[in-house]
Amino acid sequence: MATDLIKIDEVKVIVSSFPEIIGKNSDSVKRCNEAGQALLDTIQGEGMNELIDQAAADYLKKVNITIKNMDERRKPITQIFDRIRSFFTSQEREIDPKNSLSIPAKVLAKRNEYALYKYEQEKKRQKEAEERAKIEAEKANYRKAIEDSLLSYFSLYLSSKVAELQNIFSGLTYENFDRQAVGITIFQMDYPKSHFDKFCYESATYYLNKEIKNEIRKSVLEGKYEQYAQQYKSHLSSIRQDILDRIPSKRKELEELESIRKMDAAKAAKADEERRKREAEETAKQMAEIKKNEEEAKQATAMKAQKDAIGSLFDASAAVIAPPTTNAKVKEKIVVTHQQGFLEIFQMWWLNEGQSLPVEELEKIFKKMIGYCEKQANGKDQIHIQSKFIRYEAEVKAK
């Protein structure tokens, strides 16, 4: 508001009448209260009747006229005060950041826009870091799964060949010894490349596409055949050599059993059973050794995968706790997208705060809703809420 809208002379004239107006209004209040008190005394002494009720109605009409006259007398003063207050508040409003039309508000809006931009950039960075961490963790798990599956695939084949070699040795008899013993000497010590190439593994992943999975598989398989071939040959060679070293004693044992069989078949059968039991135990021991080596290798793989996963988690955590890049106060605001949402808001408020508030406080909060229900009760259809927690009381006022 411009300063020329407030005329100093006008203010002086109006303010100079202030004592007179105060005096008149004070007299009006005094006379009104005296008349009212006299009426109350009469009511207290005689009680209410039609004559006194009419006198009270006439008195209240005069009260309204008095209030109107007092309002007319004080209006020039209160209006000039309102204009003065409005002048000062309008000046303040021109630079108030809360006024969207003010220049400071526009400056603040730019700051908020920039803060929002930085906030969204930070959230985007955090999300990308978390996604990268999840991808790396899934890569590590997928790699471990392939390595474990490949190791089990190889170990199972190695175990079958160890068992096959042991079965040849265990199957030697007095009659077939020379013919079957040759099978131990010529037993294949090389790991077949064809078996390695038949390895196949696949599992569903969330973040990894086909190309990434193929790269991981290729990386895992690289150099593995050479490693397994060496391990295969070393293990089988050791077992075969151990068997070859025992061939002479095996021949002697079978010759002795044959001699015993000719004299005592039952004794020979028992001795042969004990021999087979010893050889079966030796085979089981070798199988257990292969299984142990497999488990140790899997544990090493698991430790590496866990280490990679922990590194990914650290990266994700660091991204989440990274300090904001600009000064900003961030708080979440509710945006209701459906009427049902208000019921859910009420439920949360009622369970956590509303139900513990006194009735008087709740009446203030629900004033508008209570007013609506009262309107329904006083309407044409007179709709009431039927509840043991609610009662309706008649409010009677004189017309």
Image (spheres, grey):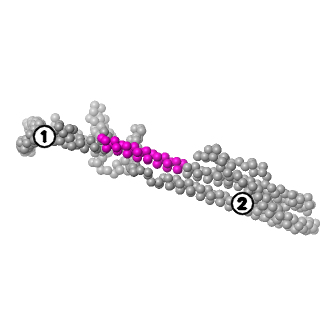
Q: Main secondary structure of the magenta part?
A: helix
**Residue nearest the viewer, comparing 359 with 29:** 29
Q: Give residue 53's position: percent from left, percent from top.
A: 10, 37
Local secondary structure at mark 1 = helix
Q: Which residue is mark 1?
A: 8
The span shown in magenta is 102-131
Q: Is residue 1 visible?
A: yes
Q: Which residue is mark 2?
A: 291
Q: Quadrant of the N terminus?
A: top left
**Residue nearest the viewer, comparing 174 with 229:** 229
Q: Callout 1: 10 Å neighbours few (<14), some, many (20+)?
A: few
Q: Is residue 135 left or right of residue 297?
A: left
Residue type for callout 2 = Lys
User: Which residue sits at x=58%, y=46%?
Assistant: 207
Q: Is residue 32 visible?
A: no
User: Which residue sits at x=68%, y=59%?
Assistant: 297
- Disc on the earlier residue, 1 or 2: 1
**Residue nearest the viewer, comparing 51 with 280:** 280
Residue 109 is a magenta residue? yes
Q: Quadrant of the C terminus?
A: top left
Quarter of the image where one finds residue 363: top left
Q: Is residue 84 left or right of residue 310?
A: left
Q: Is residue 234 left or right of residue 255?
A: left
User: Which residue sits at x=28%, y=39%?
Assistant: 371
Local secondary structure at mark 2 = helix
